[in-house]
Structures are given as C-alpha cells and as structure tokens.
Image (cartoon, rainbow, N blue to C red):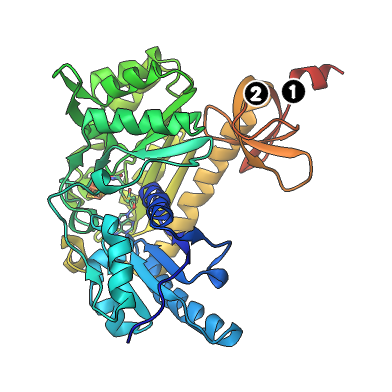
Amino acid sequence: MTRPAPKSFHVKSFGCQMNVYDGQRMAELLEADGMVAAQDEGAADLVVLNTCHIREKAAEKVYSDIGRIVKRARAATGDVPMIAVAGCVAQAEGAEIPRRAPAVDVVVGPQAYHRLPDLVRAAGEGKRAVDTDMPAESKFDALPARRRPGPSAFLTVQEGCDKFCTYCVVPYTRGAEVSRPWGAVMDEARALVDAGAREITLIGQNVNAWTSEDGKGRPQGLDGLIRALDRLPGLARIRYTTSHPNDMTDGLIAAHGEVEKLMPFLHLPVQAGSDRILRAMNRSHSVASYLAVIDRVRASRPDIALSGDFIVGFPGEDEADFVATLDVVRAVGHAQAFSFKYSPRPGTPAATMADQVAPEVMDDRLQRLQALLNEQQAAFNAATVGRRTDILIERDGRHPGQRIGKSPWLQSVVVENDAGIGEMMTVDIVSAGPNSLGGVTPARQAA
Ligand code: SAM
Ligand code: SF4
C-alpha cells in the first residue's frame, strides 16, 4: 500500500546521551530532506522512536509507546502517522518489530540512520524498510552540517565497544569500537560553535579510548583532542562522557589539572565494589585500580565532582558484595550517579549465569544504594553554598524571569535573571536542594 510522503516529523529519544545526539542528527537529516519538525508527536506525519536496549523496561516501553501513538491518532483524526523505530532496540530486534507491532513502517539501526530519508520513501511506496546494517561507510560523512545545537551540545567522537562486559548489549547493538577521525571531529566542533554552542560534551561508549592522528599525522588521545578544543575561539567549556577506568591515561588525568575549559566533572562508572563481581562482569579493573585512578584524578584537579554508574543484583552478588559497593560509594564520595537493577539481556553471557538474584533482593539493594547516593549528592550540593562560580545559561526556569544554568560541576542553578540563553554569568550560590542550587548575581546580593 502506498501512502503520501510525510511532511512533518517528531523524534523521541530514550536512553543515553548518544541517543540524544543521534536523535538531533536524525532531525537535521529529515529537515535537510524537506520535512519540518512538529511540536509534538500528535502533530507529526512521521514519528521516530529512537530507542534504548540497555534494560528490559526501555524496550517494553517502546512497544507500549507504539500502541499509545496508534490509539491516540485513531481517536484524534483517524490517520495513524508513519512510525519509525531507530536505536538499539531496532538493531537488536530488527524485523521482529513490525511483526510484533504492525503499525511500524521503518526499522533502522544506530549505524544506518543516515539512510532514514530513503527508508521513509521506501515505506511510503509500500516496500519493506528494515535496515540494521553496520555499513562500511561512515554515517557521519552522509549527515548534513550541524544546526541550532543550543548552548550545550553533544559531539559523538567514538562509537561501539570492544570491552564485552558480560551484562551489556552495547558491543552487539553498536558494534566494534570506532573513533571518528581528528579532522571530522574538529570540523564538527567548529560548526557547533559557529551555530551557537558554548559547551561541547564529547561522547562515546568509551570516550576516553578515542584515538586518531592529528592534522600533522601525530597519534593523539582524548587529552590531545581536548587541548586542541581548548584553543577553539568561542568555546567556553569542554566535557566528556562516558569513560572506562582502564582508559584514564596519564595525559587525560593531567589535562584535568591544566586545561581551563575542561570542567571539573568526571563520569567514571565502577559498576560494583566487589572484585569477585567485577571479574564476573569482565570489567578488567579492580576496586583498588579504580580507587587509584580516582586518587590521581583528585590530585590533578582537587575540586573535581565524581559521578558513576552502578549495577545491583548482578548474578551471584551476595550481601557482602553489595556492602562493598556501598563502601566504595562512601570512599569516593560520588557527587551524583546512576544506579540500576541488573537486567538480563538476551544473548549476553550474564543472562544465563547461575545465581540470578531475586527481584525483591535487588529492590532492597537499589533502595539502600540510592539512599546513600542521594545523601551524598545533597551533601555535595550543600557544600557549594557560599561559592562564587560561573554558570552557563541553558534554558528558562519554571517561573517568569527565571533562568537555569549549569555550574562547572554539572549542577542545575536557578537564578532570577534575564540573561540570554547561552550566556555565561557569575553567580553566588545561596541555597541548595537535592537536585538543584539557587544562585544570585553578586551585585544583586550586595543590593
Ligand atoms: N560504556 C559505559 C561504561 O562502561 O560504563 C556505559 C555504557 S551503558 C550505555 C550505561 C550503563 O548502563 C552502564 O554503565 C551500566 O551501569 C548500565 N547497564 C548496562 N547493561 C546493563 C544491564 N544489563 N542491567 C543493568 N544495567 C546495565
Ligand atoms: Fe557496555 Fe562494558 Fe562496553 Fe560500557 S565498557 S559499553 S558497560 S560492554
């Protein structure tokens, strides 16, 4: 059955920062193909669900979202929009998706989304439009130039992963570890700054494993790239995420102490605090080696805020293992963190390991871990009160006259101010809540 070509689209991204980046790039691609962005999915002829497969609920949510979109469209106008499923669920499930949800017209994996406009056309002509290839050509070469990135922009520099942690689907859904070349990254960074970005967050599944030759043919690691970006006029701040403890090189650690634009924040997942569990996870680092990295980073940049990812209830984790995770959190004093219940992912080694942990035990451990992490986050925020710092204004606040900016330590700071989005401003931090800070401009405080 043929159907009219969609004129408007809406992209909805789930999961990690890389999906946020991919979602923006798909939007730019569809705009370059002549479509316009709709305010919301209800007003769009094409809805793109950019999915995440890292935990079970995320995939289930996609199917319930598809059902909801169809139901809502039938009730509103009777016209169901074209639906495209992109991202890691698309990669993992492929043609199974339209079998389970026949309303889906297009399925496209994370390495093939540069072909999205062609797939949309094929679906319009009633052809099968499933593309989960990992093509040899780089999708980045086929993407249009960056537009309207906002003050804080993501820039993918590295994709895929060769580490094969036993719980994780990323090596299967995103493929082997690939670094984007130096020139392409620098060009995109310049385009982002020209389009208004003041902060760039370099992203990758293992971003600190990034390597390339620079313009003079010299091998460079992430620290070399950060030092080059430091010299980019108009760029005020640099961040990077997500890193692996084993790839924190001496150069990168030194950059934290030397590069002014590199923000004092490091997201460095440890996952668990027991060496036995880390071995079963195939993390290839120990608790001691992780803590040694943290010590060296802190020696280089004493005010750095540390973040991480944690998994509770990995197969075989007993109470003593879990308590060891709490001990690591206390030892490091994480300023923020993401914590998850282990979710068996089909096809990964851990999914078939013995001693899967009971759901109620996982619930209890997650609650205890999150209580500790929340306590530490609140303490970290409270310790910022009284500091004078710069914030980057990113958006309007909830109330008129309010703006929300980010501190160097990635905290949201609410100010009563009419500063423009993208402005850097100096504030005194005067209050702290669990999730945000209150700031005032120094002059206003003195008045
Ligand atoms: N590459 C990064 C790393 O090694 O830390 C992060 C990759 S993953 C997209 C983000 C986080 O999801 C992981 O750090 C881990 O805590 C969590 N995660 C991955 N697989 C999981 C699973 N099967 N169950 C629960 N959490 C999982
Ligand atoms: Fe997944 Fe481990 Fe690779 Fe991170 S390092 S993406 S957790 S396999």
Residue that mark 2 sits on: 425
Q: Quadrant of residue 275?
A: top left
Residue at horizontal 48 percent and vertical 40 percent from the top: 149
Q: Secondary structure at mark 1?
A: loop
Question: In terms of depth relative to the viewer, which is nearer, 373 or 40?
Answer: 40
Q: How many marks?
A: 2
Which numbered disc, 2 or 1, marks the residue that appears first in the sequence? 2
Q: Is residue 138 visible?
A: yes
CA distance separating discs 2 and 1: 8 Å
Residue at horizontal 56 percent and vertical 70 percent from the top: 43
Question: In terms of depth relative to the viewer, which is nearer, 439 or 114?
Answer: 114
Is 402 drawn above or below residue 447 in the view shown?
below
Residue 239, percent across and down? 41, 30
What type is the residue that disc 1 sits on? Thr
Image quadrant holding the N terminus, namely bottom left
Is residue 144 shown left or right of residue 347? Answer: right
Residue 39, percent across and down? 58, 61
Q: Quadrant of residue 420?
A: top right
Disc 1, ligand 1: is the CB inside 8 Å?
no
Residue that mark 1 sits on: 441
Q: Secondary structure at mark 2?
A: strand
Is 151 drawn above or below residue 252 in the view shown?
below
Question: Extreme top residue here?
Answer: 258
Tags 2 and 1 in contact by the CB under 8 Å rule?
yes
